[in-house]
Amino acid sequence: MPLTINTQEYEITRRRFLKMAMITMGAVVIAGSGVSCASQPSSHSEVTTIDTPEFIFEKENHMKSRLLVTYATAAGSTVGVAEAIGKTIATSGYAVDVKPIKNNPSLKGYQAVILGSAVHGKRWLPEATEFVENHQEELKKLQVAAFCVHIMNLGTDEKSKKNRLTYLDPIRSLLPIVDEGYFAGRGVDPDTSTRFERFMAGLMQIPPGDKRDWEKIGAWADNVKIIE
């Protein structure tokens, strides 16, 4: 009996295979880039709105300088990090404002600035880089520290350390940075993520769950070089 093939069914199967192959190849390309699956909506119809609040931390009779902590976030991890940094610095007697970069905060009245961003594609979010570009001359007159929130290259090995340092290369080329911090963010939540999100996270070797180390974040804020 001659072999017969349902060409329509074959074409559908072929298209499905090619689509999955392209998705997989895309995941492999961005592996190691600092991109987190947690930042992506679970479906095309779902729109994720990330809160970007402002905070003010100051003692009633603060006698020291006023600092700005400004941040850019994609999935929300960086909000908590920026808040913790601001709150910690304020315990030393400084007045600290924590504001989202997307609101283009003014730099007037501040003696120092801490800039922070989530890392996607081995770089800060575009809004954070654009803020530095637009305020480059003002920032050069201030003490500036910077921090990154990422989910890749979390190890203590030399390769991970080297990869982390490249995240700030574009920022260092624009202005001097007196101190740098690198903090783990959040991966895919195993309790709320879809099976596909968990699969992609595993494929890219992204650790699941919240990896933020509040002790490490607080220690950095306690000793950041822009404060006396």
Image (cartoon, rainbow, N blue to C red):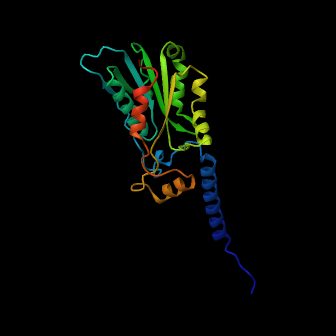
Residue 83, above or below 41:
above
Picture residue at 49% right of the left edge, 54% below the top? 197
Picture residue at 51% right of the left edge, 18% below the top? 135
| Residue 36 visible in the displayed image | yes
Residue 218, above or below 45:
above
Location of the N terminus by quadrant is bottom right
Q: Closest to the observer: 112 or 193? A: 112
Q: Position of residue 137 (x, y in %)?
A: 54, 14
Q: Is residue 34 left or right of residue 108?
A: right
Quarter holding residue 78: top left
Q: Position of residue 121 (x, y in %)?
A: 58, 39
Residue 6, above or below 208:
below
Q: Is residue 167 left or right of residue 185?
A: right
Q: Closest to the observer: 1 or 86? A: 86
Q: Residue furthest bottom?
A: 1
Picture residue at 53% right of the left edge, 19% below the top? 134
Location of the C terminus by quadrant is top left
